[in-house]
Each structure stands twice: as C-alpha cells, then as structure tokens.
Amino acid sequence: MSLIINFRWCVYCCSADLRLEEHRDALCIINSTGFVYHVPQVVYKSSCPIDVYVFPFDIQNCTLKFGSWAYNGKELDLQFYDQKEWIDLTAYLESSSWTIVDCPAFRHVTDYSCCPDSPWVDMQYHLIFQRRSTLYNYILILPCILLTSITLILFFIPPESPAKMQLGTYYCLNMILITLSSFLNVLIVDLTTHGLRTASPPRFSKFFFSYLAKCLLMEDLVRPFKSVPSKSRCPKDGNLGRLEDNKWKHESGGSNEAIVQMQREQISECDGVLKEIELKLTELRDFMRVQKMRLLERDQRESIARQWKAVALLLDRIFFIVYLVVIVASLSYTLPTLTSVRSQYQSTVLDKARGLL
C-alpha cells in the first residue's frame, strides 16, 4: 500500500543545506508487517576542501555526514540498507572531468558529555574521486616537456660559439611572451564577466566604441554589444490609473423622498463594491510597478554586461596586434644576430684551419 508522506510520522529534518526547496516528496510503501519504506528525493550540495598539490593528478575526498540533531541513537537508529557500506552508483552519470575511485561508508556512534547515556548515531559517506588528466597532459604537461627539451640544444652548441647566449636569450623571451599571453587572456576573460558584478565601464570606453573600433575594423563586431537604450513596454504609472475617491452625486429632480432613499441605498451598495475594486486595482498597480522596476534593472544589467563584453573584445584585438608586433620584432632582432654570429664563427673556424695548415 502506498500513502502520501503527510499521513505518516516523519523524522524531524533540519538540513545544513540552504537549498531546502530541492526536497521532493515521495510516496511511502507499507507492507503487511507494518514496515514503512520511504526514500526521500533530495538534491544535496556540499563544499569540500580541495588539495591541488599534485595537480592535475590530484585525488579529492568529499565527506557527506548524515545524522539526527533531535533524536539520539535510542530513538533513531541509523543502519545501512541491505548491509551495503558504500554509495550506490547504479544511476551515476560519468563525468568528463572526474572519475570516482572509491565511495566507502562508515557508521559512527558517538557519546557526548551532555548526555552520556544516549549515544548519537551518524553515517559518513566518503566520495573519493580523481581528476581525469588526459586533457591536461596535452595542453599543459606535453608543451612544458617540449619547451624544456628544446633547451637541451644549448648543450650541443660549442662553448666558444656566441650563439649559445643568443639562443638562451631567445628562449627567455619566448617564456616571457607566453607568460604575458596567459595573463592577458585571463584579463580578457575577467572583463567579459565584469559587467555582472560592477557598474558600467568608464567614460573612456566610448573612445573604444567610436574611434578604436573603426581603426581595428571591428565596428560590425562591436555594434551588437553596444549599449542600446531599452524602451520599456511597461506602461507608466499614469497609464495604470490613479485611483481617487469618487463620490456619487445625485441631483434629485423631484421631492419624492422614497425614490431618493432607494437611490441612496443603491449608492451605498455600489460604494462597497467600488472600494473592493479600488483595493484590487491598487494591488495590481503596485504589482505592475514592481515588475516594471525589475525589468528596468534587468535591462540595465544586460546593457552593462554588453558594454564590458565590447571592451573585452576590443582589448583582445589590441593585445593580439601588440603580441604579434613583439613577436615579429623579436624575430627581426634575433635571427639577423644569429646569422651574423654564425658567419663570424665560421670565419673564425676557417682562419684557425688555415693557420694550422
């Protein structure tokens, strides 16, 4: 037999998770022996300390603790279902970033000094998962190994060759450029999400949109991100109707008091209906005003976010040009130097060979 959760005794649930709205009711299954089977449907959120000492080969341990704060072990004895001391991963969906290594569970019985005669039972589930390092092997470890291996070429150059120092300078310059590129990329990503938490861009951003975008041939790309004054479709307060106390006026054409009295009674009944309508319209007007303010605030936030995205897009193109100029300049300086050093070294070797002959 299945019953709704409201028709049974429920354990007092006080969760440390703030997302109490994630709790979903489920039917209880009751058999002939009086055993009640109830599986609450809850989405839990937990924050775990992260150890990145061996990144990207790190292994994390997230602990989930379940216990009662209101009932001791004599009143509520928590036990493993079907003696399964682990987390059931039957319905688990594989993650592209993490892989679960182990998921043990432990039952703890604790005695506190406040109530030594009443043990308290809790269940701890440990979720041990490891980061998938395949992606980081290609984008992080392998490039570092290749860059480090290139420096081994310096040891094969003869000690008397000046190119040894020139290649070392070139490699150092490449490392500086890579570091600068990573820093600028992080800056661009931060500016892209900057509008979600700060005010509008400074005034000099208009110079970016008006002149710099034309110089960089990005006017068409920046135009969708520009701030466009939003035209709210919400009616103004004046259009919502200002309610005023309207009094019925009656001008009697005759002296018939019965007719006048009947009209007064009808007017008093209409006054009550009008007051109720006025109250409903006032609530509707306040609700529309609140919705209008929310729409205006949302449009303003979206406009600010678009402006910051436009600034980030322009700065990204500027940094690209500067980075390209620096690379070309460094190559223009380094390659002729290496060529001249090579010719000088060859002439020196030839002179020594001729002297020996």
Image (cartoon, grey):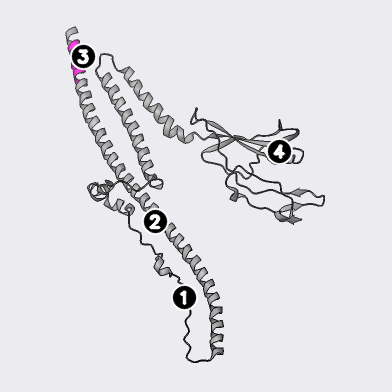
Tell me the number on the disc at residue 246.
1
Q: Is residue 357 visible?
A: no
Q: Quadrant of residue 312?
A: top left
Dot 3 or dot 1: first in sequence order is 1
Tell me the number on the disc at residue 349.
3
The type of residue carrying mark 2 is Asp
| Residue 299, percent from left and from top | 39, 56
State the CA–CA distance, disc 4 to disc 3: 79 Å
Circle 3 SS class = helix
Label 2 crowding class (10 Å Cα cut-off): few <14, some 14-19, many 20+? some
Q: Nearer the viewer, mark 3 or mark 1?
A: 1
* Residue at x 74%, y 50% (from the top left corner): 9
Q: Quadrant of the C terminus?
A: top left
Q: Nearer the viewer, mark 4 or mark 1?
A: 1
Q: Which residue has dot 2 on it?
A: 299
Q: Nearer the viewer, mark 3 or mark 2?
A: 2
State the CA–CA distance, disc 3 to disc 2: 74 Å
